[in-house]
Image: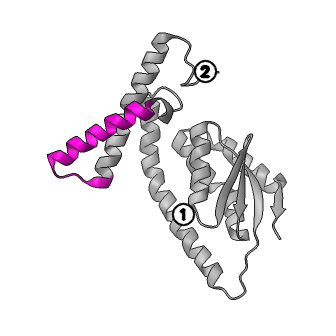
Amino acid sequence: MTSLFEPKTASELGSVALGSRIATALVAFAFYVFLGDPTDWFDVVTGAVSAVVVAIVLGRVVFEHTPTLRTLGILVRALVFLPYLLFAVVRANLSLAAVLLDPRLPIDPAVVRIPAPRGQLATALLANSITLTPGTLTLDVDGDELVVHTLTPATRDELLAGELARAVEFVVGHSSVESEQAAFDASTHGGEERLR
């Protein structure tokens, strides 16, 4: 198995590095424009220079594989995923606030294991999405599983239902059938450790 860090030939090294750096520069510049809304030429030039610097420094580690048209599809699907993730974060915030304001405090912390998706990008995206959502925290990636701390039964059930995992599978373009079966297996057979 080859990686971006150990290409087989010098020509492969050049194509991987150049393709990754160009794609990284484009993504960094698009992100800058989206967040900064530059209206002055100085801002545009500053953003372009910053994108080039980011591409030179991080170009070979940003992408798991050499960027292709499939990579563009992943980026487009990621733009669709962002509002979904923001909605999930807001919904989890409201749910957790309701639990914390309830005088009975129905908190039941536990650590669960869920299947990790295929690929480093998918695993990182799912782990970070889980951590961004209040009430859940990714503790570790253990082989092909994510170890996740959950605060309430509701957050645990939602996580084990696999909706977030299916959304991540959509972003990276993997089949959702495998992730649905894995989520079902985790909910019926997966380990759960109570924290008392």
Residue 84: image location, x then y, percent = 49, 58
Helix, strand or loop: magenta stretch: helix
* Location of mark 2 (residue): 2
The part of the chain drawn in magenta is 35-59
Q: Quadrant of residue 3?
A: top right
In the picture, measured across the screen, residue 19 lies left or right of residue 110, that is left
Q: Secondary structure at mark 2?
A: loop
Q: At label 1, which amino acid type do we have?
A: Ala
Label 2 Cα neighbours within 10 Å, binned few <14 / some 14-19 / many ≥20: few
Q: Which circle marks residue 116 in the picture?
A: none
Residue 36, magenta (yes or no) = yes
Q: Sequence order check: which comes first, mark 2 or mark 1? A: 2
Magenta includes 37?
Answer: yes
Is residue 91 at all visible to an observer of this figure? yes
Q: Residue at x 67, y 45 (%)?
A: 179
Residue 18: image x %, image y %?
Answer: 39, 23
Label 1 environment density (alpha carbons within 10 Å; few <14, some 14–19, many ≥20): some
Numbered circle sitting on residue 88: 1
Residue 166 visible at all: no
Which amino acid lies under the numbered mark 2 shown in the image of this protein?
Thr
SS of the residue under disc 1:
helix
Quadrant position of residue 58: top left
Q: CA distance from mark 2 to mark 1?
A: 36 Å
Along the line of sight, which residue is nearer the eye, 138 or 118? Answer: 138
Q: Nearer the viewer, residue 62 or 67?
A: 62
